[in-house]
Amino acid sequence: MSFGEELHRLRTEAGISIPDLAARTGIFSDYLAEIEAGQDTATAHTVEKVTACLRELGISEDDLASLRNLASGRPVPDKLKGRSISAAYVSTGTVGWLAIAFILLTAAFESIVIAYGGYQKFASLSVFSATGLDLLLGRLADLSFLLEGLAGLSFMTWFYLAARNLSALGVRWLDHSPFEAFYFIVPIAQFYVPYALMAELWKASDSSFLDDHSWQKAKRSPLVVSWWSCFVLKQLILVFVAVGFNLELAGEVIFYVTCVIAALSVTALIREINDRQRKKRGFLGGVQQPMS
């Protein structure tokens, strides 16, 4: 039997739900649920909190000893014991999924518009007057522009909140400010600063590195490079179009593929960083207290 299975048995025996156990221990319920499901491991801090709570609910010492023996999670380093998560920590799940929804919708609408434009060129249909389909595609292009604005706003909001969470998680020696998440709207700086912040965010969110500076040893992610390369290429193509450069069919295909890869890469980044920060919060105990 695993630690999670034994925890589930004892919790059920004590007649307490996961949300109630979370409220009593100060450990986040989603982390406890994943421990019971065998999808995550419990730290020494978590085991201590859970066993103390179950003892108060009447679980026998023999059962608690068995539970502790099954615990296999890596311990929290001594210098981190008792450290709490700052109240400045904000869950980025909702805004992250909102950003993902707008990003994927934008990519879908752009795909339709670009595909139809390419078909017109390939079939030499552009010589005909605008049809109902042409007008519909025009409306879709306008809607795509609106969605891209909403996607950008929601993504920058998520980016800022996730970067701000690093300090709340006790991460130190950071080179970048959370406000750099908005540098997408700053000329020239938009081509490097957000990338540097995302690379730092990825490494510092790694739950394998719990103390304040060891995150610098974390590996870089090819997802960050993929997303940023496609973003820069997309912006350069838009600049060429703005100055009058006429894209051929091959250019439109490249633009389309770039948009799709960028959308899929940033979607994966949002999900993975949210998951990393949630796990890091769980490993550190998930206790929320006001900042001193």
Image (tube, rainbow, N blue to C red):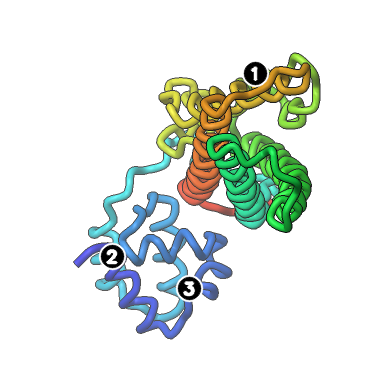
Residue labelled with disc 2: 67
Q: Residues within 10 Å of mark 1 (few under 14, many from 20)?
A: few
Give the camera-side residue of 82 and 100.
Answer: 100
Residue at 51% over, 65% down: 29
Residue labelled with disc 3: 18
Amino acid type indicated by mark 3: Ile
Give the camera-side residue of 137 and 263.
Answer: 137
Residue 156 bears which disc, if any? none
Report how far apart the C-alphas of labels 1 and 3 lie in the structure.
Answer: 38 Å
Amino acid type indicated by mark 2: Leu
Mark 1 vs 3: CB contact within 8 A? no
Report how far apart the C-alphas of labels 2 and 3 lie in the structure.
Answer: 17 Å
Residue at 54% over, 60% down: 28
Residue 8: x and y, percent? 34, 73
54 to the left or right of 27: left
Residue labelled with disc 1: 175
| Among the two numbered marks 1 and 3 on one chain, the one whose residue lies closer to the N terminus | 3
60 to the left or right of 80: left
* Quadrant (top left, top right, bottom left, bottom right) of the C terminus: top right
In this orientation, does residue 292 appear? no
* Quadrant (top left, top right, bottom left, bottom right) of the N terminus: bottom left
Residue 281: x and y, percent? 53, 47
In this orientation, does residue 23 appear? yes
